[in-house]
Amino acid sequence: MARKKKKNKGILENKLSIAFVTTVVLAMAIALGVKVNSIKKELASREAYNQKVVEKLDSEEQRAKKLEEQRKYVQTDSYIIEMAREKLGLVFPNEIAIKAEK
């Protein structure tokens, strides 16, 4: 009888140990799943931010290119003539200036 009690007690302890280990493993799996999900969200957020930064960089590069073209144009004779005509109303000696009435 004592042997049967001891055997039953050992089986019960084994079942409790298995249940405990299973519970710990499940808890760790859930915690790991939550952490992986959190990391995926953070990664998606950073990728979206990186995409915005790349788009902004492209936009600024295009803007810098346009400004460089404008800087070169401002240094040309055609720009100087255009501004002299528009802003100062100057004309070449062989031209006649005609102004529209407002």
Image (cartoon, rainbow, N blue to C red):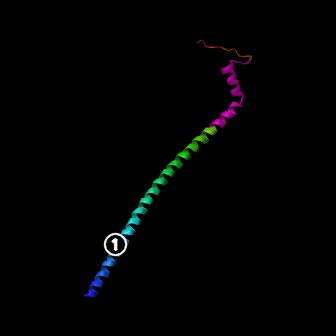
Left-right relation of 66 to 40:
right
Q: Residue furthest right?
A: 93
Look at the image and say whether residue 1 sits in the magenta stretch.
Answer: no
Q: Is residue 75 magenta?
A: yes
Magenta part mainly helix, strand or loop? Answer: helix
The foreground one among 69 and 55 is 55
Residue 57 in the image, given as x and y percentages of width and height? 58, 44
Q: Residue at x 30, y 78 (%)?
A: 12
Task: From the image, tell me which residue sits under label 1.
Answer: 19
Three-letter code for the amino acid on which mark 1 is drawn: Ala
| Residue that sits furthest to the top in the current view | 101
Give the residue displayed 63% in from the left and 39% down from the top. Answer: 64
- Look at the numbered disc 1 and give the secondary structure of its residue: helix
Residue 48, given in percent of the width and then of the height, sits at 50, 49
Tell me the quarter of the picture where residue 32 sits: bottom left
**Measured along the vertical axis of the image, is residue 99 above or below residue 57?**
above
Give residue 40's position: percent from left, percent from top.
46, 56
Residue span colored magenta: 66-92
**Residue 93 located left or right of residue 101:** right
Quarter the N terminus occupies: bottom left
Q: Quadrant of residue 98?
A: top right
Compared to residue 28, the image places residue 91 above or below, namely above
Question: In the picture provided, is 94 more to the left or to the right than 36?
Answer: right
Closer to us: 6 or 71? 6
* Image: 42 above or below 97: below
Residue 7 point in image, percent of width and height? 29, 84
Front-lying residue, 7 or 70: 7
Residues 51 and 82: in front is 51
Name the outermost residue toward the left.
1
